[in-house]
């Protein structure tokens, strides 16, 4: 067997093996159910008075992460599309002006009288905290969300979720593919199949939309 023939044989074997793996992966994804968050707490129904919510800037442990360049806009946009209540987006500048910090980690002590001041500033009934972690901007994409919807007067939880979306898992791929086909992914050509699984920004839209779809109705 000549060197050229051997090289061609090896390349064919590699291509065949890659094709078989891809076929098996696609078969697994095709049989998977779209991911449905389960680690969450929703009350049965939002009270009538709960109709105005202030949305805080997203928190991530790395303040220089590129994730924060678009996360605030995307999570606010996807929440607004649920049309459950009026949303008020609080900017980093407003947070810094009124509380001395641009973002808050909801798992740590909040600034003094934080909920009361938010209510006075916004006339809102509730506040949404969104903490992001497990961020992986390369394939397989991943993003973790720990979010809480809190009544500003009582401090009680109206809704909470703690989930990690890892596109290395078949059910997350299946869910992202379903999201890709919906009208919520705007300005994406039908020819760009897989964009949700390639773009960290669009993947975060899928994550936000899936999380907020579990909120209680009115």
Image: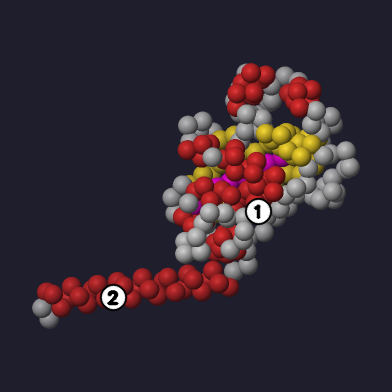
Q: Residue at x 47, y 32 (%)?
A: 64
Residue 32: which quarter of the image? bottom right
Side (left or right) of 34 relative to 216: left
Q: Which residues lie in the magenta part?
A: 140-148
Q: Is residue 17 above or below residue 113?
A: below
Q: Residues within 10 Å of mark 1 (few under 14, many from 20)?
A: some
Q: Which of 56 and 157 is in front in this view?
A: 56
Tags 2 and 1 in contact by the CB under 8 Å rule?
Answer: no
Q: Name the residue under label 1.
A: 210
The dominant secondary structure in magenta is strand
Q: Number of marks in the image?
A: 2
- Is 128 contained in the magenta span? no
Q: Position of residue 206 (x, y in %)?
A: 59, 53
Task: Residue at the far left: name it.
Answer: 2
Question: Quick one: SS at disc 2?
Answer: helix
Side (left or right) of 112 relative to 182: right
Q: Mark 2 points at which residue?
A: 13
Q: Which residue is drawn at 67% across and 19% down?
A: 98
Q: Is residue 68 above or below residue 95?
A: below
Side (left or right) of 155 relative to 212: right
How far apart marks 2 and 1 lie (CA) works out to 40 Å
Q: Where is residue 191 in the image (x, y as percent from the top left)?
A: 47, 64
Q: Position of residue 195 (x, y in %)?
A: 49, 57
Name the quarter where the N terminus is drawn.
Answer: bottom left
């Amino acid at each position: 067997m000549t060197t050229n023939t051997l090289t061609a044989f090896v390349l064919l074997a590699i291509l065949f093996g890659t094709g078989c793996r891809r076929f098996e992966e696609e078969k697994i994804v095709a049989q998977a159910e779209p991911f449905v968050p389960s680690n969450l707490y929703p009350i049965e129904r939002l009270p009538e008075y709960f109709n105005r919510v202030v949305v805080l800037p997203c928190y991530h442990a790395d303040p220089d992460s590129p994730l924060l360049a678009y996360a605030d806009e995307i999570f606010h946009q996807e929440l607004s599309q649920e049309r459950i209540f009026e949303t008020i987006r609080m900017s980093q500048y407003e947070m810094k002006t009124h509380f001395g910090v641009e973002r808050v980690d909801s798992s740590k002590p909040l600034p003094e009288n934080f909920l009361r001041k938010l209510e006075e500033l916004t006339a809102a009934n509730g506040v949404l905290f969104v903490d992001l972690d497990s961020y992986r901007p390369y394939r397989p994409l991943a993003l973790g969300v720990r979010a809480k919807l809190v009544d500003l007067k009582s401090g009680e939880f109206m809704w909470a979720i703690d989930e990690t979306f890892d596109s290395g898992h078949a059910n997350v791929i299946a869910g992202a593919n379903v999201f890709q086909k919906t009208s919520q992914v705007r300005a994406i050509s039908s020819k760009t199949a897989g964009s949700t699984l390639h773009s960290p920004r669009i993947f975060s839209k899928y994550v936000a939309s899936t999380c907020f779809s579990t909120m209680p109705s009115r």
